[in-house]
Amino acid sequence: MKYDVCNARLIKSKEIAKGIFDFVIECPQLAQKAQAGQFAHIAVPGKTLRRPISICDATDQTLRIVFQIKGEGTQILSETKVGESIDILAPLGHGFTIPKGKKIAFVGGGIGVPPMLYSAKRADNAVAILGFRNKDAVILEEDFKSVCSKVYVATDDGSYGIHGFTTDILKDVIDEVDMVCSCGPTPMLKALAAICKEHNTPCQVSLEERMGCGIGACLVCACKTLDKNGNVEHSHVCKKGPVYNAEEVVW
């Protein structure tokens, strides 16, 4: 695992939806190593444990993260001012495997949408399926439109886009794609995996688990998966994941 620690500089901060912040961080030595689906482990002043946040995008010079305030730690992080430094351990984890020449559906739900952007950028032919609670929660739609051949947006309450869920859309387009990559709530991932299995379509899922160290030294993020012989084992999401082939996961 090739990662590093950097005191990086925040060069952009914007609240793009209520309680959801978009940060661009200058850190060339980390950004140039980043792969689709990996995450950053960020130190928060006054807190012992770092906060794991998926990488939304990367250039040669910057990392982009989009995160939601979920507690005191992320609230403190959101208050970081442009020009201030951020202590980052990155890039971490095993990301998505994006094959060449394939049409891939990138499915994100809620705050699972951001990591799909950099992943979609790595594909030769990307389709995005994005799910949100309502119109006010919709984020990054224009970013996805700039890199995808088609972008579908669904809202639970029908206030924007298609009234329904990402699974409803995937059922309609599953026969048009070669692979599915996804990130979001576990029930969504489980349902997507079932659809892909039914249609014999390869599916990769990015799991969300609470993390401690972020490098596989503690046991906080252990989850049940299957080894190559089909036996149940406990693997570290931060190290072997967060991305798994769907058939590896014990749902």
Image (cartoon, helix red, strand yellow):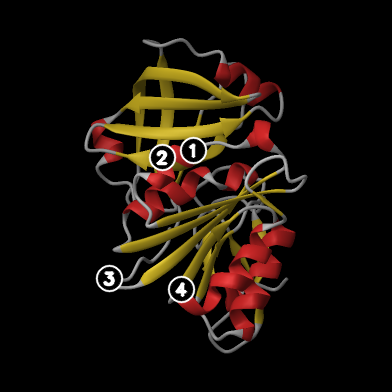
Relative to the observer, which residue lies in front, 239 or 56? 56
Q: Is mark 3 on a helix, strand or loop?
A: loop
Give the residue at x 34% y 73%: 102
Tag 3: residue type? Lys
Give the residue pinned by disc 2: 143
| In this view, the mark in front (3 or 2) | 2
Q: Is 129 on the left or on the right of 103, as rendered?
A: right
Q: Earlier in the sequence, mark 1 or mark 3?
A: 3
Give the residue at x 45% y 18%: 13
- Is the C-beta separation of discs 2 and 1 under 8 Å? yes
- Is the C-beta separation of discs 4 and 3 under 8 Å? no
Crowding at dot 2, Cα within 10 Å, few <14 / some 14-19 / many 20+, comes out as few
Up/down of 206 relative to 77, above or below:
below
Give the residue pinned by disc 3: 100
Q: Give the numbered dot on residue 179.
A: 4
Residue 97 picture quarter: bottom left
Give the residue at x 59% y 77%: 196
Tag 2: residue type? Asp
Q: Which of marks 3 and 2 is nearer the N terminus?
A: 3
Crowding at dot 3, Cα within 10 Å, few <14 / some 14-19 / many 20+, comes out as few
Tag 1: residue type? Leu
Q: Give the numbered dot on residue 140.
A: 1
Using the numbered discs, state the Cα–Cα distance from disc 1 to disc 3 in whole angstroms: 24 Å
